[in-house]
Amino acid sequence: MSKKQSYYVQSDLIFLFILFVCVSLLSVYNAQQLEQYDGNNFVFKQIIWFAVGVCIVAAIQFLDLEQLYKASALIYGIGVLVLIALLVAPESIADRVNGAKSWFQFPGLSLQPAEFTKITTILFLAATISRHKTKHAVSSLKTDSLLLFKILLITAVPVFLILQQPDFGTSMVYLFIAGMLIILSGISWKIISGLILLISAIGAAALGFVVKFTDLAKELLGKQAYQVDRIMTWFEPSQPSNDASWHFDQAYMALGSGQLFGKGMDALQVSFPEAQTDFIFSVIGESFGFIGSALVIFLYFLLLYKLVTIGLNIHKHSPFGAYVCFGFLSLILVHAFQNIGMTLGIMPVTGIPLLLISYGGSSILSTMIGLGIVYRVAVEHSIQSDYLFK
């Protein structure tokens, strides 16, 4: 292998990816053994999604960060246009599922645009922050306020469109990513503190309203009244049974029944909907117990640590690459925390998948696109490091 080829072999990222694939396939295989999935081969489809994802990662390596930086606005714009197209598309290709118009549905294929626009938004946010920091080398309250406005505006467009579907859970992921990048962009803590206080006050007021005036909140939300049930179940798991509490009870029972070492393969006993997607961590807990669950959490810790390392190392050479890493880190972090948290009962139930493990084409492909860009950042860091020491 030549030195040039060796730049493209990021062994630590490859090793982590292989581990995630193994965990995903084992977990999805166990999930599909439940009676309600009789005849469905989710594992085969998952292998196909991962294979396509690997091809995407390889294709991204033909681009460099400068090209991605220059094209970020165009890529973001395409993502926004796809979200608009989804809202106006006829029901023949974009039917409502569980009350939300979130998917393009073609024969044998369903795609959720909001998953992909997470990556396009991260790219444009990273480019915007990098460009702003270059233009305003010396920051002030005025320039920091301008940067904050840019970040919020870029994030608000896809969030508004996703709320029209409506998909509250996914829109919150965008806001978390924006929040993390606001903190990491170096904006003055005077501004950030004020923003945190404002958001906290609005959030507390909204939660207080839902808890105090539950029936009125359901009436105002209309078709999305189930969101109130999810919040109330989060606050009071022992409340009278509803769909949200039933999901939580079943997931919690599955997770706890695995005990220390789990029940092993082909031994699941607790059934619940979406076991292969939203509640895959419950399957892991029941199959592999506390030990297996802890190892999966540790695996995410290693990935997050690697993303932090790559971002910090590349920052001097390419701030854009660093902010891409931090944005992707935020995406992985919020999905892992929310998905595992709702299984443990510390977060409300939402349809947020466990990235790189949950079954799903849109989830896998969008995450692989993000991973491919991060991989490219790591490659460029290796190249720069080699030149530095020549």
Image (tube, rainbow, N blue to C red):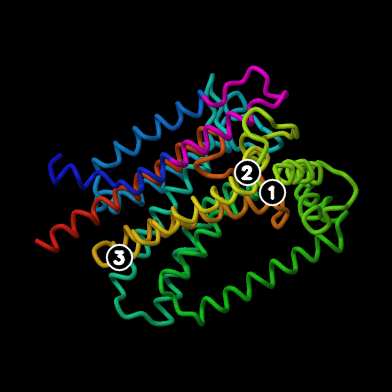
In the rendered image, residue 31 lying in the magenta stretch gets the answer yes
Q: Nearer the viewer, residue 33 or 379?
A: 33
Residues shaded magenta: 19-43
List the residue tagged with mark 2. Answer: 281
Q: Position of residue 311 (x, y in %)?
A: 35, 61
Q: Nearer the viewer, residue 188 or 154?
A: 188
List the residue tagged with mark 3. Answer: 315
- Choose the circle earlier in sequence order: 2 or 3: 2
Label 3 close to label 1 by CB (< 8 Å): no
List the residue tagged with mark 1. Answer: 343
In the rendered image, residue 217 lying in the magenta stretch gets the answer no
For mark 3, give the secondary structure.
loop
Label 1 close to label 2 by CB (< 8 Å): yes
Outermost residue toward the left in this view: 390
Q: Nearer the viewer, residue 276 or 193?
A: 276
Image height of 130 relative to 365, above or below: below
Label 2 close to label 3 by CB (< 8 Å): no
In the rendered image, the quadrant that contains the N terminus is top left
Instruction: Estimate how packed mark 1 is, as few (under 14), some (14 to 19) or many (20 or more) residues with alpha carbons within 10 Å.
Output: many
Q: Position of residue 333 (x, y in %)?
A: 52, 56
- Whole-number angstrom distance, CA of label 3 to CA of label 1: 36 Å
Identify the residue at image location x=70%, y=52%: 344
Identify the residue at image location x=43%, y=54%: 122
In the visual, does 390 lie left or right of 137?
left
